[in-house]
Image: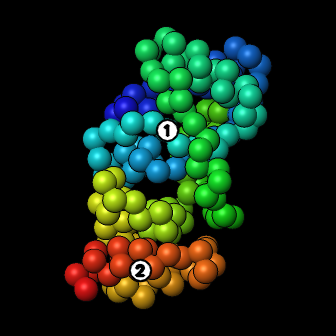
Amino acid sequence: MTKQEIKQYLYELDEELRSMDVKGEICLYGGAVMTLVYDARPDTKDVDAIFRPADKIRDAARKIARAHGLRPDWLNDAVKGFLVPHNQRILFDLANLKVYVPEPDYLLAMKAISARSNTMDAEDVRLLIDQLKMKSVDDVLDLVEKYYPREQIKPATQFFIEELFGQ
């Protein structure tokens, strides 16, 4: 999904919620944020988010999926198992849907701790490091530790960050 498609589907989600007389909230993560907010990539395969009321938003998302031939899980909450408390800001304040995104420091910590190969994570982390003007591996690891306990940080995360800094 491109930036324009994500926006379109979120606006349609707002309309579906309006027709259901439901007010909803959604916070976007991952590739959707990198595409929509940072223009870091041309598209993403799905929209990772947490949302409420979950059942109503799932119903509305299924209608949008059918209307556009999208995968049924184009909007999914698989990310919820990886979240820790963090600040968010409003991206869109629509009539029936408030759309939030995490602050860039949290997004960086989340992407760094996942450190998945064969994904866009390295490019995303580089962009966020630049955005936050971080200068060293220790800066990034200190940020990750702000959100995730030391014992949750895999050695692969440290190696991943060191590699990004050419160490």
Q: Residue furthest front?
A: 155
Image spot of residue 13 (x, y percent): 59, 25
Q: Residue furthest left?
A: 166
Q: Measuring 55% from the left and 40% from the top, which residue is drawn there?
A: 92
Q: Nearer the viewer, mark 1 or mark 2?
A: 2
| Three-letter code for the amino acid on which mark 2 is drawn | Gln
> Alpha-carbon neighbours of circle 1 within 10 Å: few (<14), some, or many (≥20)?
many
Q: CA distance from mark 1 to mark 2?
A: 27 Å
> Alpha-carbon neighbours of circle 2 within 10 Å: few (<14), some, or many (≥20)?
some
Q: Measuring 29% from the left and 47% from the top, which residue is drawn there?
A: 41
Marks 1 and 2, the one that precedes in the sequence: 1
Question: Which corner quadrant of the image does residue 16 belong to?
Answer: top right
Secondary element at image label 1? strand
- Left/right of residue 162 with respect to residue 63 in the rendered view: left
In what quadrant of the picture does the C terminus appear?
Answer: bottom left
- Residue 158 marker: 2
> Please, is residue 158 above or below residue 73 in the view?
below
Q: How are the colours assigned in the image?
A: rainbow
| Three-letter code for the amino acid on which mark 1 is drawn | Val
Question: Which corner quadrant of the image does residue 54 belong to?
Answer: top right
Q: Measuring 41% from the left and 47% from the top, which residue is drawn there?
A: 31
- Left/right of residue 163 with respect to residue 53 in the rendered view: left
Q: Which residue is mark 1?
A: 47
Q: Is residue 83 visible?
A: yes
> Please, is residue 84 above or below residue 45 in the view?
below
Image spot of residue 160 (x, y percent): 35, 73
Q: Is residue 124 visible?
A: no
